[in-house]
Image (tube, rainbow, N blue to C red):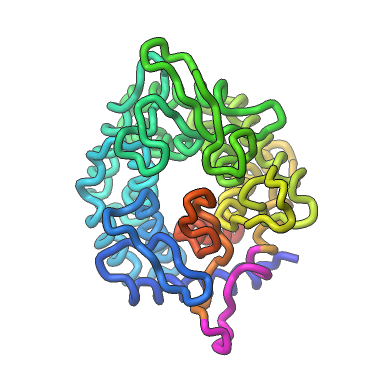
Amino acid sequence: MLTNALVAEAQSRLLRRIDQTAAEIEERFPHAADGQTGRWESRPEGAWTDGFWVGLCWLAYQLTGEPRYRTWGLEWAERLRGREKRLTHDIGFLFQYSAVLGWRIAREPALRELALAAADQLVSMWHPKARVIPAGTQAEVSAGTDDVTIDCMMNLQILWWAAAETSDTRYRDVAVAHAERTAEWHVRQDGSCVQSVHFDPVTGEPVKKHTHQGYSSEGTWSRGLAWCAYGFLEAHRATDREDFLDIARRAIEFHTRRTADDPVTYYDYDDPRIPNAPRDTSAAAILASAALGMDAILGAEKGESHFREEAARVLNALIRGYLTPLDTSDRRPPGMLLHGCYNLHTGEAPDHELIWGDYFFLEALTCWQAR
């Protein structure tokens, strides 16, 4: 059973991990850590995940009020400056969790300016025929100007924020158009989703659909489902549209149906090797946070409690089965969220701690306490 005491203890482990990470890393952002040693791996050229380390610092500062976390957040956010000009949809990931979250928590004007610059770049990438934001020529995965991914629903967050912050309707117009097209192209009737859709740049019509990071082209990649649930929930919060909320609801309910025995999902729900397939704790953490977001809306308005129950089911499993303890007899650092799977096909970080998994795990734990 998930208790407030267990949640607080898990938060303390994650805070220890943040402190240990800050002491270990130098110039490069942490991306994935070896599950046996806890040693962080980074990408010399930077990764789409780099904003999540800054976001962890902001969450830690919000949680504790300790000045060192604010200092780290400002320092590492500044190191992202310049990357808001890249032609990749992932600037949403980079600057939502570094600059927007930092602005909300620390109220540092430079962060607001950086976030708006990133939002402007994302809007400039909009394809008017297809009515989507393509992955972009500098995207790390599936780069191109004719491909739109389910991941980009998360990148829209910076546009929802910019629209509310400035009252400039162009941010909202692009975000709404992209969400509508993603709902049409990516979402399946059973609540699952496809990862990528390629379109004809001239006509804007879809020509190919596939899930390239899942087990198979037709499968359901669990992190893609998590991005779908969380991203459409944020679209509902920004627009109050019930169709967006329904997509988020169906995605979470798909996860619940497919994980009756263990809520920590496998990398792909349709992997025929289950139960010997790799899991992805980062997907589970994202889904737990999305479930708590659903509870905040539907639990209060309509008395629906099963989304909070689902979040509790996932968080309890992650804490008890996948989070390294404070026990000093364990050689690994405390607070590692183990068994995250980044990209099974390329072999990159297939069984690792993932920086975004840590972020969404701490976010979900913090949201649980707030409710």
Residue 362 placement, left or right of 69: right
Quarter of the figure with residue 53: bottom left
- Residue at the location (79% across, 55% down)? 261
Q: Is residue 325 on the magenta stretch? A: yes
- The residue nearer to you, when weighing 255 against 209, is 209
- The residue nearer to you, when weighing 346 against 313, is 346
Quarter of the figure with residue 328: bottom right
**Secondary structure mainly formed by the magenta segment:** loop
Q: Inspect this view and state whether residue 25 appears.
A: yes
For the image, the number of numbered tags is 0
Q: Residue furthest top?
A: 203
Q: Is residue 233 above or below residue 292?
A: above
Q: Is residue 138 on the magenta stretch? A: no
Residue 359 placement, left or right of 293: left
* Picture coordinates of residue 118, whole percent (x, y): 28, 39
Q: Residue furthest bottom?
A: 329
- Residue at the location (69% across, 63% down)? 317
**What segment carries the magenta color?**
318-331
Quarter of the image for the N terminus: give it: bottom right
* Picture coordinates of residue 351, whole percent (x, y): 55, 62
* Picture coordinates of residue 9, whole percent (x, y): 59, 74
Residue 142 placement, left or right of 283: left
- Residue at the location (65% across, 30% down)? 246
Q: Inspect this view and state whether residue 12 appears.
A: no
* Picture coordinates of residue 202, whole percent (x, y): 36, 12
Quarter of the image for the C terminus: give it: bottom right
Quarter of the figure with residue 140: top left
Q: Is residue 97 above or below residue 64?
A: above
- Residue at the location (63% across, 56% down)? 279
Q: Is residue 36 above or below residue 90?
A: below
- The residue nearer to you, when weighing 184 against 342, is 342
